[in-house]
Amino acid sequence: MSTPGAFESTVERFGPPRRRSGRAILAGVDGSDTAMRAAAFAFGMARRESGRLIVAFVVCRTALTNLGPAVAATVEHDTTLQLYAELRDQIRETAEELEVPVSFLKTFGDPYTALRDTADRGQVD
């Protein structure tokens, strides 16, 4: 299986098959300690309530874009791919360990707007 590009939207599913009943819970991750604690809390909620979890990784342009297109594109691409791979592995391991159905979404744009739109589409609580 080929690895998706850094700037390609993806959805991957981990853990047991998606449950028809139960809540949908959304957590946004960016690799920070705060976001990872929030994701851990969301995993616990989904497990206790027999729900499903949607974890969103939103990629947005950084200040590096002002350095020049070539430099910014290379640095952003490599950094995004590495962070995405690390987060994907952590999410997959936790989903399998806790037996929580998880959709791991990578998308682009303003984090607030992307999370709001994901919440609407996923009908999260």
Image (cartoon, rainbow, N blue to C red):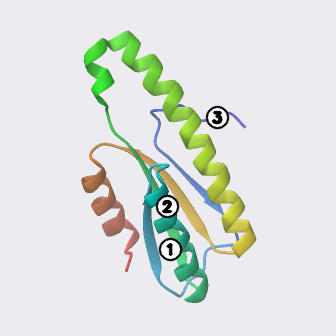
The answer to which of 24 and 61 lies nearer the viewer is 61
Q: Secondary structure at mark 2?
A: strand
Residue highlighted by disc 2: 55
How far apart are labels 1 and 2 at the CA level?
A: 9 Å
Q: Secondary structure at mark 3?
A: loop
The residue under the point 53% across, 25% down is 78
Number of numbered tags placed on the structure image: 3
Residue 28 location (% of width, % of height): 42, 59
The residue under the point 68% across, 65% down is 94
The residue under the point 62% across, 44% down is 86
Q: Amino acid at mark 3?
A: Thr
The residue under the point 38% across, 10% down is 70
Closest to the camera, between mark 3 and mark 1, is: 1
- Residue 85, labelled with which disc? none
Residue 47 location (% of width, % of height): 61, 82
Residue that extends furthest to the front in the rendered view of this protein: 33
Of label 1 and label 2, which has the lower sequence position?
A: 1
Residue highlighted by disc 1: 42
Q: Amino acid at mark 1?
A: Ala
Do the residues bearing badges 3 and 2 touch, measured as CB atoms within 8 Å?
no
Residue 107 location (% of width, % of height): 41, 46
Of label 3 and label 1, which has the lower sequence position?
A: 3
* Apparent side of residue 108 relative to residue 80 in the rendered image (left or right): left
Residue 69 location (% of width, % of height): 33, 13
Closest to the camera, between mark 3 and mark 2, is: 2
How far apart are labels 3 and 1 at the CA level?
A: 27 Å
Q: Is residue 77 above or below residue 21?
A: above
In which quadrant is the C terminus drawn? bottom left
Do the residues bearing badges 1 and 2 touch, measured as CB atoms within 8 Å?
yes
Q: Is residue 28 above or below residue 59?
A: below
Residue highlighted by disc 3: 3
